Image (cartoon, rainbow, N blue to C red):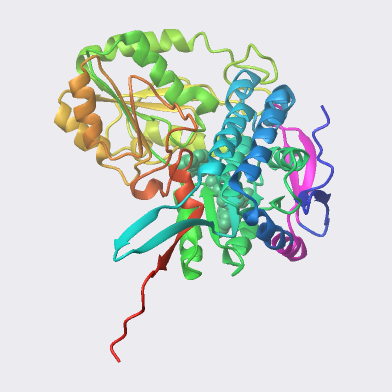
Amino acid sequence: MDIQPKASHFIQGTYVEDNNGTPIDVIYPATGEVMGRVYSATPEIIEQAIVSAKSAQVAWAKLSGGERGRILRRAADIIRERNYDLSVLETYDTGKPLSETLCADATSAADALEYFGGLAGSITGEHIPLGDGNWAYTRREALGLCVGIGAWNYPTQIACWKAAPALACGNAMIFKPSETTPLCALKIAEILLEAGLPAGLYNVVQGSGDVGAALVCDPRIDKVSLTGSVPTGRKVYAAAAAGMKQVTMELGGKSPLIIFDDADLENCVSGAILANFYSTGQICSNGTRVFVQKGIKDAFLNRLCERLDSAIIGDPQDEATNFGPMVSERQLALVLGFIKKGKAEGARLVTGGNRIAGGGFYLQPTIFAEVTDDMSIARDEIFGPVMSVLDFEDEADVIARANATEFGLAAGVFTTDFSRAHRVTDRLQAGTCFINSYNDAPVEVPFGGMKMSGIGRENSKEAILHYSHVKSVFVRMGKMESPF
Ligand code: NDP
């Protein structure tokens, strides 16, 4: 497959190049080979994107929601028809195995476009009777021009989780993918255009943090939606605040997964595997602090290691592979640094811990046991295939420990006692909780974090609130009264 895009940026319905920008190599994580090249957006490219989106948005917002929605639903259909090719591209961009990308990336993007396309016609206000025949009504209006900034782990999904609600509400979007994964958003732009989206409403510009920062600071931008780390979130939120812009911040996590000793063993082992090793552990909501109650700990670790032996690590384009490389040499080095710290701080390395020889950025799935709350592998987001297993005995104690973190993205509980499951989730400080499950993210359900893990919600009807504002219109039916 030729993965080199026609040009770096997609503006006003067409590919645009400006090779005065800094070159960005597209590296295939499975081999480390350079597969293509794009150029970072220059100030001229950023200007073109803003001018184009700004002017396209006016007419778009005037269409009925139903008309906008039809285009989004058509794009969803095209994405589903091309799922295979889009999944292959996602695998080249990220290194995630095709067995995953075939069912978790373009499909999730299509779900978002279909869902928000369906919802577009019912984005309405309300009628508020006020007595004396007076009344008011509210309107949900588009914000204007939204900027989406993506992380590298789910480039297709992130592009659409932001674009779908933004466009449904009548906004335009400029999307900046992570410089590590520049390819997939360009395909989404092509497909949206093919589905009938007017030129300029979804522009893609490439570049690193400086391009993102230039967009966020531009006074013509009305909203910023970032998926990224907490340190980046702090900077972007501060820059947006200076212009009083709306934000959605989908940031990092260090989520707890609590396994009580009455849990179904096979189920909780599956949950822990999914919560730590899917996408080679590069998922923000992963349950990386696995608290295991004493009575089940040995059985849990034994079964976990048995199940890990059946991981198929290899060529991510081979559909049999279920564990691929990390996204980049840099990310691999970061994770190896955490593994070194884990060993130095006295955690027991149960399995893994090493880079896998050969080309590409492969790391063994890694499990540490006897991890304590103060260790860096229990405190910091690692964003790689490293599971930390912590012991606990008492319910109240584990809840306090689970909450003792600056993050609040997700949390999971495995138990067969449903009273306990609800009692515990009631007290967990997390935007999304899972009971006997982990990492489900259907578009119908709000997704986002508490505490340092973010602001606002993606997906579901909630996202509409974050891509529109409400205008109140007061209507007096009788005569106006005034003091003099
Ligand atoms: P980063 O925070 O490094 O980058 C995120 C995006 O922000 C990138 O496109 C980056 O550009 C851009 N960026 C960096 N600095 C600035 C700036 N000053 N102004 C504007 N944009 C900027 O995250 P990663 O890409 O490394 O992704 C991993 C992180 O994302 C993890 O912490 C993970 O938890 C989080 N994440 C959160 C999710 C959620 O939904 N809550 C989902 C997925 C990931 P570039 O990298 O190209 O330089």
Does any portion of residue 129 appear in the rendered image? Answer: yes
Q: Is residue 140 left or right of residue 316?
A: left
* Among the 4 quarters of the image, the one containing residue 93: top right
Instruction: Identify the residue shown where x is 64% and y is 50%.
Output: 175
* Among the 4 quarters of the image, the one containing residue 53: bottom right
Residue 42 shown in magenta: yes
Question: How far across and how far down the image is residue 275, in percent?
Answer: 43, 25
Residue 343 shown in magenta: no
Q: Is residue 344 left or right of residue 416?
A: right
Does any portion of residue 152 appear in the rendered image? Answer: no
Please tell me whether residue 262 is drawn above or below residue 67 in the rendered image: above
Quadrant placement of the N terminus: top right
Please tell me whether residue 351 is drawn above or below residue 400 in the rendered image: above
Magenta region: which residues? 22-51
Q: Residue 474 versus residue 268: which sits nearer the camera?
A: 474
Instruction: Identify the residue shown where x is 76% and y is 51%.
Output: 199
Question: How far across and how far down the image is residue 391, in percent?
Answer: 24, 24
Q: Residue 482 versus residue 306: which sits nearer the camera?
A: 482
Question: How far across and how far down the image is residue 171, in percent?
Answer: 60, 54
